Image (cartoon, grey):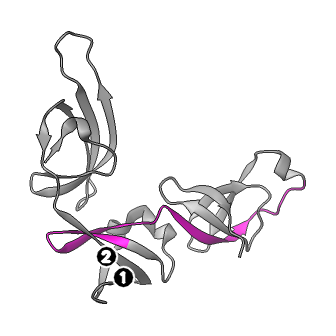
Amino acid sequence: MINSSDLKRGVLLDIDKAPWQVVDCSFQTPSARGASTLTKIKIKNLKTGQVLSKTYRGGEMLETADCERRSIQYLYKEMDQFVFMDQENYEQFSLPAETIGDAQGYLLDGLSLRSLLYNGQVINIELPNTVDLVVADTAPAIKGATAQAQLKKAIMETGLEVMVPSYLTTGEKIRIDTRDGRFVSRVNE
């Protein structure tokens, strides 16, 4: 159980016998005397992908989802299924493209990440905060671009489209933040 005033982004809740993850959370204090703080959350159903907005009064207790996280490794894509291997028992399992969603653009063979299990069944994956990818295609570098903060489109080796600084060229390895899809830095090897 968790107090509604202790909610934050990423917390897993059990609502109507289904796992939901808090996507966004804000607190509002009414100006009336004696009024309790309101917690407004946006939650996503981890099985169906449905997104809802809910409001709770301060002090309300909510049921947390009984989920387990395990280390896994991405192996390959077969048709519209993504195949992974559990790092603890070496069993392979697959998830459909709809479940993976936007995370598809960050998956490289051999990538280590975590799976989210609900009642012993894998329902989703959690990416690392950053992933290193090679720029497959982008416009040529612009002379003097380091002095200006201009961005250009780049297509990564996985097909992901990212806005990058204009001094980057095709073939360079860069670090991307998986939470918002932004360029973080060059990767020097």
- Examine the rendered structure and indicate whether residue 143 appears above or below residue 138: above
Work out which residue is located at the far bottom of the displayed protein and give it.
90
- Is 156 on the left-hand or right-hand side of 55? right
Judge depth for marks 1 and 2 and give the one in front.
1
Q: Nearer the viewer, residue 9 or 158?
A: 9
Please state the horizontal and vertical placement of residue 123, each as a whole percent of the image. 25, 68
Please state the horizontal and vertical placement of residue 104, each as a whole percent of the image. 45, 69
Q: Quadrant of residue 91?
A: bottom left
Residue drawn at the location 27% of the way across and 12% of the way down:
31
Whether 141 is among the magenta residues is yes
The label on residue 72 is: none
| Marker count (numbered) | 2
Magenta region, residue range = 114-143
Q: Tell whether label 2 touches label 1 (CB within 8 Å).
A: yes
Work out which residue is located at the far right of the displayed protein and give it.
143
Q: Quadrant of residue 173?
A: bottom right
Q: Which residue does the numbered mark 2 point to in the structure image?
A: 95
- Is 80 on the left-hand or right-hand side of 38? right
For the stretch drawn in magenta, the main secondary structure is: strand
Whether 40 is among the magenta residues is no
- Is 189 on the left-hand or right-hand side of 47? right
- Examine the rendered structure and indicate whether residue 1 appears above or below residue 32: below
Label 2 amino acid?
Leu
Residue drawn at the location 31% of the way across and 90% of the way down:
90
Label 1 amino acid?
Phe
The label on residue 84 is: 1
> Mark 1 to mark 2: distance in Å?
8 Å
Q: Nearer the viewer, residue 122 or 140?
A: 122
